[in-house]
Amino acid sequence: MSTHSASAAVGEVLRQPDDLLKLSAYRAKLLKEKAALDAKLASGVKAQLDATRDALLKLQNARATVGMIREEMMLVEKLKSGEESGEAFDKITRVSWTREWLLRSDRVVAADVRPGRVQIGSSFMAPQNIRFPRRQ
C-alpha cells in the first residue's frame, strides 16, 4: 500500500518533462522535512526517557524511605514489647492525647466564648484504649 501511495506521489510531482528539473529541489525539500521530523521524534523520545528516569529515581527514593520507616517501626515494636518500655509508651500516649485535647479545647474557646455557642462534640471524648493510672 505504501508503494502505491509513493508512486502516486511521484506521479503527481512528475507530470511534465520540465518537472525532472525540479526533482533535486523536491528531494532537498523532502530531506529537510525528514530531518525536522527526526529531530522532533528524538526530542520527544529524550523527554520521555528523562521523565521515566526521574520517576524511577523517585520510586527508588520512596522505596528506601519505606525501608527506613519499616526498620524504625520494628525498632519501636521491640522497645514497646519490653515491660518497662510499655509503661513509657503508655505515658507518652496519655500526654499526647492530653495535649491534643487541650489544643482542641483552645480552638473551640478561641472560636467563640459566648454562652450557648461552644459545642463540644464527640471528638473530645477520651479514646477507649488509653489507661489512666489511678492515684494512690
Image (spheres, helix red, strand yellow):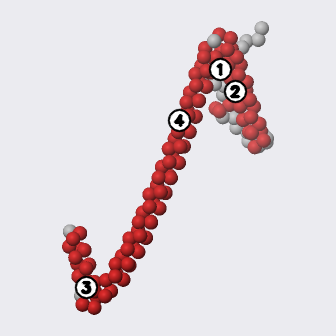
Distance, label 4 to label 3, CA atoms, is 62 Å
User: Which residue in the protein does label 4 denote?
Assistant: 63
Eyeballing the image, is 67 above or below 134?
Answer: below
User: Which residue in the protein does label 3 denote?
Assistant: 14
Residue 30: horizontal and vertical position, in percent?
Answer: 36, 76
User: Which residue in the protein does label 2 denote?
Assistant: 97
Whether the residues at callouts 4 and 1 have beta carbons within 8 Å, the answer is no
Q: Residue at x 75, y 31 (%)?
A: 102
Eyeballing the image, is 85 above or below 31?
Answer: above
User: Which residue in the protein does label 1 denote?
Assistant: 130
Q: Is residue 36 left or right of residue 26?
A: right
Residue 58: horizontal and vertical position, in percent?
Answer: 54, 43
Foreground: disc 1 or disc 3: 3
Image quadrant where residue 131 sits: top right
Does dot 1 land on a helix, a strand or a loop?
loop
Amino acid type, mark 1:
Ile
Whether the residues at callouts 2 and 1 have beta carbons within 8 Å, the answer is yes
Foreground: disc 2 or disc 4: 4
Foreground: disc 4 or disc 1: 4
Q: Is residue 127 left or right of residue 10?
A: right
Image quadrant where residue 10 sits: bottom left
Amino acid type, mark 3:
Leu
Does dot 4 land on a helix, a strand or a loop?
helix
Amino acid type, mark 2:
Trp
Q: Is residue 98 left or right of residue 14?
A: right
Q: Earlier in the sequence, mark 4 or mark 3?
A: 3
Foreground: disc 2 or disc 3: 3
- Front residue (pair 26, 123): 26
Amino acid type, mark 4:
Arg
Distance, label 2 to label 3, CA atoms, is 87 Å
